[in-house]
Structures are given as C-alpha cells and as structure tokens.
Image: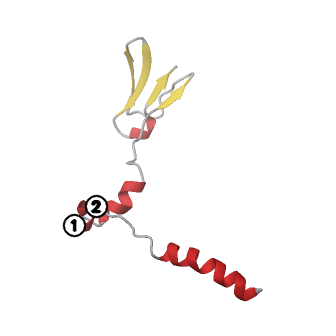
Amino acid sequence: MLRSLLVSTRPIILRLKTTPVSVSAHHLHHPGCLSQASTPPLARGMKVRASVKRMCDGCSVVKRKGRVYIICSKNPKHKQRQG
C-alpha cells in the first residue's frame, strides 16, 4: 500500500522540483531589486483628526482650501489635517 502511494505521488514531486523560476534580465544585473519589489516604498502621510493641536514649538497652524493643517518643521510625524 505504501509503495502504491509513493508511485502515485512521484510525478507530482518531480513536477514541483522542475518548475522554472522566471527572473527578468534587469534583476540579473540588479539582484537587490528582487527584495524591494515585494515591499512597497514607505510613505509617511499625515494624521487625520477631528481636532488638531500643536505638539511642539515647531508646529504651525495653516489654513488651506477650507481645511486646517498642522505642519511641523522639527518633526514630520506631527503633520495633521482636520476633517
């Protein structure tokens, strides 16, 4: 019984081992791009809150297009938008 099981699974195992992995010519010259392609680039946005407040003395209140923004020159994590 075990032998019949092994005989039936051998073609599947052989197919799994022989599947080719496609890599473009660009990635052959730049191997570092392969790891970066799966992760998106980090983009830091701003906090959207109902009430915005200054967090430090570098934060300034700006009104643009009917919205209130907090822009910080010292720490970019302090960026906020009301709404």
The answer to whether marks 1 and 2 mark residues whose Cβ atoms lie closer than 8 Å is: no
Q: Quadrant of residue 62?
A: top left
Question: Compared to 2, does 30 lie above or below?
Answer: above
Q: Nearer the viewer, residue 81 or 25?
A: 25
Q: Residue at x 40, y 47 (%)?
A: 42
Q: Residue furthest top?
A: 66
Image coordinates of residue 40 in percent, x first then y, are: 41, 49
Q: Residue at x 28, y 61 (%)?
A: 24
Distance, label 1 to label 2, CA atoms, is 9 Å
Q: Is residue 31 left or right of residue 3?
A: left
Lower position in the chain sequence, tag 1 or tag 2: 2
For the N terminus, which image quadrant?
A: bottom right
Callout 2 secondary element? loop
Instruction: Name the residue carrying label 1.
Output: 29
Q: Which three-letter amino acid code belongs to the residue tagged 1? A: His
Callout 1 secondary element? helix
Instruction: Name the residue carrying label 2.
Output: 24
**Number of other residues with Cα within 10 Å of mark 2, as a class: few under 14, some 14 to 19, many 20 or more:** few
**Number of other residues with Cα within 10 Å of mark 1, as a class: few under 14, some 14 to 19, many 20 or more:** few
Q: Nearer the viewer, residue 13 or 43?
A: 13
Q: Residue at x 32, y 64 (%)?
A: 23
Q: Which three-letter amino acid code belongs to the residue tagged 2? A: Ser
Nearer the camera: disc 1 or disc 2: 2
Q: Nearer the viewer, residue 4 or 56?
A: 4
Image coordinates of residue 57 in percent, x first then y, are: 41, 33
Labelled disc at residue 61: none
Q: Quadrant of residue 49?
A: top right
Q: Is residue 42 left or right of residue 26?
A: right
Question: Compared to 9, does 45 lie above or below?
Answer: above
